[in-house]
Image (cartoon, rainbow, N blue to C red):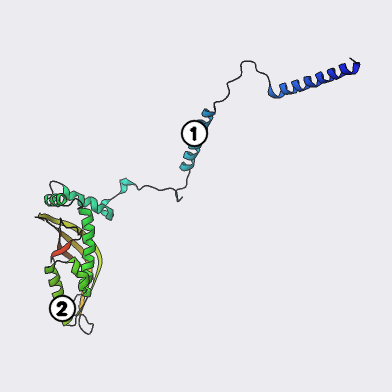
Amino acid sequence: MGEGYFLDIIFLAMVAGFIFFRLRNVLGRRTGNEPPPPDPRVQDRSGDQSSDQSADQGAANQPVGDDNVVALPDRSRFNPADNDDARPQAEAALWADESPIGAGLTKIKLADHRFEPGEFTNGARMAYEMIVDAFANGDRDALRPLLNDQVFDNFVGAIDEREDKGHTLETKIVAIKGTEIIDAELKDKMAEVTVKFVSEMVAVTRDEAGELLPDQAGGTHEVTDIWTFARNTRSRDPNWQLIETHGEN
């Protein structure tokens, strides 16, 4: 072998040595005391916890006016008397054993499992407004499904008499101040529930010329009506009908 061959071997050895030392400086060398490699599962959990903490801190720092934040009401300041939503809760007290109408409500409930005092009271209130308005306007078609035959005949008789005289009735319910169940009973299969309505109302009758009748008092006055509604608990028709009316004033 010639001298050039040995020179090539020496040159390659020097290059290999240079590469080895460069790798050692970059990668280091194991001594047996290195810490174990990190567990990727632990890192994932840590990342989740960090994200959760960041999210919690972000929620805590969220401004109150942000649309994504729903502030719950302060229950300590809640007054049932100031909220119409408290009415069903008040009606629920009617089921109490000491309530004089509790037995009647229980019988109705047993005959018709869909019956709920709160829902009934809301429906009775709507019916009250519809009937008062239809009677004032002489709308017999609107009255027909809401009244039983006897009450319907009485209402239509009063409308006919008013129209024969050329009178018109103007009625406006300004506010309903109270809607209260005061009696309930089940007669065979007929459920009957009596409701007291207290309202602020404007009601005047005018003559043919549009002038107020002499005995008419203008302005708003309080009216208390006692109405009884009935329904056949075995009927598929869920609607109640007005079967009796009278007032306290």
Residue at point 23%, 67% (across, down) = 130
Crowdedness near tag 2: few (<14), some (14–19) or many (≥20) residues, C-alpha within 10 Å: few
- The residue singled out by tag 1 in the image is 49
Residue at point 22%, 64% (across, down) = 127
Q: Sequence-wise, which precedes: disc 2 or disc 1?
A: 1
Please provide percent x and percent y for residue 228.
14, 61
- Looking at the image, is 64 positioned above or below residue 39? below
Which one is nearer the viewer's eye here, 239 or 90? 239
Please provide percent x and percent y for residue 38.
56, 25
The quadrant in which the N terminus is found is top right
Please provide percent x and percent y for residue 93.
19, 49
For marks 2 and 1, give the CA distance: 79 Å
The quadrant in which the C terminus is found is bottom left
SS of the residue under disc 1: helix
Residue 247 visible in the current orientation: no
- Looking at the image, is 247 positioned above or below residue 90? below
Which one is nearer the viewer's eye here, 164 or 249? 164
Type of residue at label 1? Gln
SS of the residue under disc 2: helix
Label for residue 160? 2
